[in-house]
Image: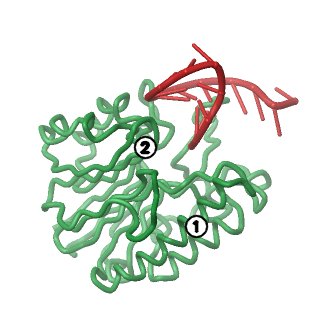
Amino acid sequence: MQMKIASWNVNSLNVRLPHLLQWLADFQPDVVGLQETKLEDAKFPAAAIQEAGYEVVFHGQKTYNGVALLSRSGALQDVQCGIPGFDDPQARVIAATVNGMRIVNLYVVNGQDIGTEKYDYKLRWLAAVHDWLAEDLKRWPKMVVMGDFNIAPDARDVHDPAVWDQTHILTSSAERDALARIQSLGFSDAFRLHHPDAGVFSWWDYRQAAFRRNLGLRIDLTLVSDALKNTVQEAGIERTPRTWERPSDHAPAWLQLAAF
DNA sequence: ATGGTTGATTTTCAA
């Protein structure tokens, strides 16, 4: 049994619901993590998603943030909202178990600029994720951690490495170190298992015709634990929804697992 | 050149 697992920052599910439904029909993912739904739970469009064939759980708030998990191949069990033990007013995390595999969906803090309070929050938040996943891996060795990481892992993942360097938000040394520390628990970037090339991106700023010029970053990642690494058959980024009218600024990042 | 665009809620904030 194969499984396609995808991560998509939709930048308002209220606006993007038609795109989500179209893309579910086109791409046929088995499990999807959404970020930036920007919806209170009472306003989440659960019925429309269920009618598309997916079970869904969600953790949202008004105006900002908000995450959800969809599954059409196995119940979503042991649902966890937020990072255990980390007091966080922002709805950025939802996790669940599907067919014995732990799925963690993250909307990582953006961080605004180096040296700001939001940057400090980002680093504290990433450290809390590290400590949480270190524990959860003991219970669920088969784990996928996906989301909008708001970190470009290395120079291949940015359109202009001279601008996006260690002094810049999303590429600073402390951010990349925090990601590397999480990966050192035993996670691989699924995209890099199959694609060593530079210049493949998942996010393009709405401004300055960035998508048309491919001035992007790869900040949407799917990580697989060591127990799943050998089952990753393919991984990629779906550019098509970014070409649709009134798109999200992010494209879905996905991986395909063989029998697991 | 501190610009530009989008989304949710305003008389800006966050990305």
Q: Amino acid at mark 2?
A: Glu
| Circle 2 residue | A36
Q: Is residue A8 above or below residue A167?
A: above
Q: How many marks?
A: 2
Please state the horizontal and vertical placement of residue A178, each as a whole percent of the image: 60, 71
Q: Residue at x 37, y 56 (%)?
A: A254
Q: Relative to A110, is A230 above or below? A: below
Percent coordinates x, y for residue A246 in the rendering: 45, 25
Task: Give the chain of mark 1.
Answer: A
Using the rendered view, name the quadrant where residue A255 is placed: bottom left
Which mark, by number, is residue A124?
Answer: 1
Instruction: Say what amino acid the circle numbered 1 marks.
Output: Arg
Q: Nearer the viewer, residue A136 or A199?
A: A136
Of all chains in the rendering, the one displayed in green is: A
Secondary structure found at label 2: loop
Instruction: Give the mark, 1 or 2, whose residue is nearer the N terminus.
Output: 2
> Chain B appears what colour?
red
What residue lies at 38% left-to-right and 61% top-to-bottom? A82
Residue count near mark 2 (Cα–Cα under 10 Å), binned few <14, some 14–19, many ≥20: many
CA distance separating discs 1 and 2: 20 Å
Q: What is the number of the mark on residue A250? A: none
Of residues A57 and A220, which is closer to you in this image?
A57
Q: Which marked residue is nearer to the observer: mark 1 or mark 2?
A: 1
Q: Position of residue A200 (x, y in %)?
A: 55, 52
Return the residue nearer the eye: A6 or A56: A56
